[in-house]
Image (cartoon, rainbow, N blue to C red):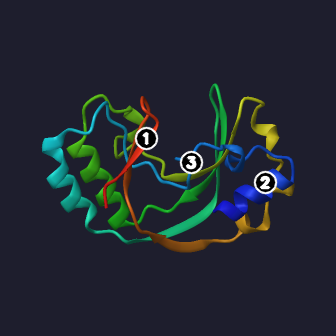
Amino acid sequence: MRRVWGRLAEMGMPSLAGHAHATNRPHLTLTTASELPWDARPALTETLSVLPLPLRLEGTLRFEGRTSVLAWRVVADPGLAALQRRVRELLPGGGNPLFEPASWVPHLSLGRTRSGPGSWPAALLPAELSAPWEGRFTAARSYDTGSRTVERLV
């Protein structure tokens, strides 16, 4: 993942390789919540105990809005879909509706820009993005947007 970030940056395309904050690392967001309540933690830890899970990346996605995003598409197998659904059930308050199981689009972000979708010409994307890639999801963490801190969950 970091190699692809680096390749995008080397080619002059927007990439998360340039995001220097210490918490920046490849990740898959399962849900968002306004807080991580202490009373939800035991059930969350138990739910996350299914890790590691298989990971399959296949093709790219582009999201448009205030910011354009290039992402690697994560294939949601039944185990990953069940994990996301359960985490969402445990942390429902204040979360973004895009993380409702029927709306969730699992992906790993590669780059973000305000310059528009033309920032990543398909013909120039790194070759790694054109073939399926397999790996494992091995850990879970929580990111606090207010304090910009990370807490390892499992």
User: What quarter of the picture does the N terminus occupy?
Assistant: bottom right
Q: Amino acid at mark 3?
A: Asn
- Circle nearer the N terminus (1, 3): 3
Q: Locate the C terminus by quadrant.
A: bottom left
Identify the residue shown where x is 81% and y is 40%. 119
Res. 8 mark = 2
Q: Nearer the viewer, residue 111 or 127?
A: 111
From the image, tell me which residue sits under label 1: 149
Q: Is residue 117 left or right of residue 42?
A: right
Other residues around mark 3 within 10 Å, as few (<14) / some (14–19) / many (≥20): few
Q: Quadrant of residue 134?
A: bottom right
Q: Residue at x 39, y 63 (%)?
A: 139
Relative to residue 70, is residue 45 depicted above or below? below
Q: Amino acid at mark 2?
A: Leu
Label pair 2/3, CB-CB below 8 angstroms: no
Left or right of residue 4, residue 123 in this image: right
Q: Nearer the viewer, mark 1 or mark 3?
A: 1
Q: Residues within 10 Å of mark 1 (few under 14, many from 20)?
A: few
Name the secondary structure under disc 2.
Answer: helix
Residue 117 location (% of width, % of height): 75, 37
- The residue tagged 3 is 24
Relative to 20, does residue 58 appear above or below in the rendering? below
